Image (cartoon, grey):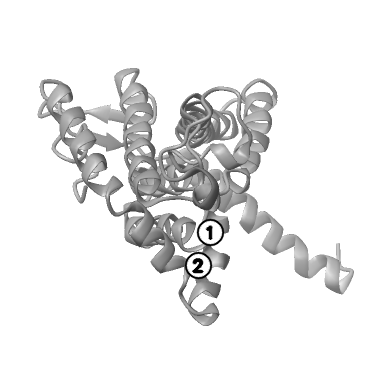
């Protein structure tokens, strides 16, 4: 996963999808035998150790990323037609491309996870005493039967890779936050380890898939002859932001002193 320019992560390629799926299924099968032990061991951690996980679990919420992206989408779509020709219009187009990429990479993977949670209907750990680890209420279920896969983990992992694609210097930090978010879901008793692993995989592959689609259409990313995919950058958007901040910086002292 360190090579963020690869077409797919985890050694996955177009020719070994079936083998990858079998290996993933085998890993999940093995982990099932440790689900209850690991889940309840982490839940029994002292309160002082649980507190940081209870805080960081909120990073798995999609709203904090999707709402700003939606606002940026609306503004950039309008700016594409209303902004004066030149730098500001090009910046609007790049903002539209960037915000749509982030919105789809995080939102689409989250939507897929929510659909799977409802279709599978696995009982959460809090139901273990009543139903056991292998109880399922498929399709028609409440939140306590929507354990597999973990939505928070999916969102956190997709976010980490989105950041890695467009700002690689921050990837290690966001990946650490994503991994901690996934573990936190077990610590607070909302998911089993297998739910977390599935969330990691869906979030990762979903982000890669959306990026590959954008690269295929030569939007934001381009694909080299060797198959690696590179972020083009958003130079016009960056320049427009610098110009806007510079203008605000000049205006602010004038307002404070009352000078024209």
Residue at 58 percent of width and 28 percent of height: 89
Residue at 46 percent of width and 75 percent of height: 45
Q: CA distance from mark 1 to mark 2?
A: 6 Å
Q: Nearer the viewer, residue 128 or 230?
A: 128
CB atoms of marks 1 and 2 within 8 Å: yes
Q: Is residue 38 left or right of residue 86?
A: left
Q: Nearer the viewer, residue 92 or 13?
A: 13
Q: Is residue 165 left or right of residue 77?
A: left
Residue at 65 percent of width and 40 percent of height: 67
Q: Is residue 129 above or below residue 217?
A: below
Mark 2 packing: few (<14 Cα in 10 Å), some, or many (20+)?
some
In percent of width and height, residue 75 lies at: 68, 32
Q: Is residue 92 left or right of residue 198?
A: right
In percent of width and height, residue 193 lies at: 36, 51
Q: For residue 75, say whether it is visible.
A: yes
Q: Which residue is mark 2?
A: 53
As drawn, the label of residue 57 is: 1
> Which secondary structure lies at badge 1?
helix
Residue at 40 percent of width and 44 percent of height: 195
């Amino acid at each position: 996963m360190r090579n963020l320019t690869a077409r797919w992560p985890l050694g996955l390629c177009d020719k070994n999808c079936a083998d990858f799926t079998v290996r993933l299924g085998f890993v999940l099968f093995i982990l099932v035998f440790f689900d209850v032990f690991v889940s309840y061991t982490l839940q029994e951690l002292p309160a002082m150790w649980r507190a940081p996980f209870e805080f960081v679990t909120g990073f798995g919420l999609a709203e904090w990323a999707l709402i700003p992206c939606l606002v940026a989408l609306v503004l950039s779509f309008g700016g594409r037609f209303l902004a004066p020709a030149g730098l500001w219009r090009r910046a609007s187009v790049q903002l539209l491309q960037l915000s749509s990429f982030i919105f789809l990479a995080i939102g689409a993977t989250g939507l897929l996870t929510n659909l799977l949670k409802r279709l599978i209907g696995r009982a959460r750990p809090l139901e273990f005493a009543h139903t056991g680890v292998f109880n399922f209420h498929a399709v028609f279920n409440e939140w306590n039967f929507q354990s597999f896969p973990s939505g928070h983990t999916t969102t956190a992992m997709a976010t980490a890779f989105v950041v890695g694609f467009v700002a690689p210097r921050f990837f290690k930090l966001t990946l650490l936050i994503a991994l901690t978010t996934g573990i936190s879901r077990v610590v607070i008793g909302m998911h089993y380890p297998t739910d977390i692993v599935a969330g990691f995989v869906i979030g990762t592959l979903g982000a890669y898939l959306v990026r590959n689609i954008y690269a295929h259409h030569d939007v934001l990313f381009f694909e080299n002859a060797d198959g690696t995919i590179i972020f083009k950058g958003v130079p016009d958007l960056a320049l427009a932001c610098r110009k806007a901040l510079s203008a605000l910086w000049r205006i602010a002292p004038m307002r404070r002193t009352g000078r024209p």
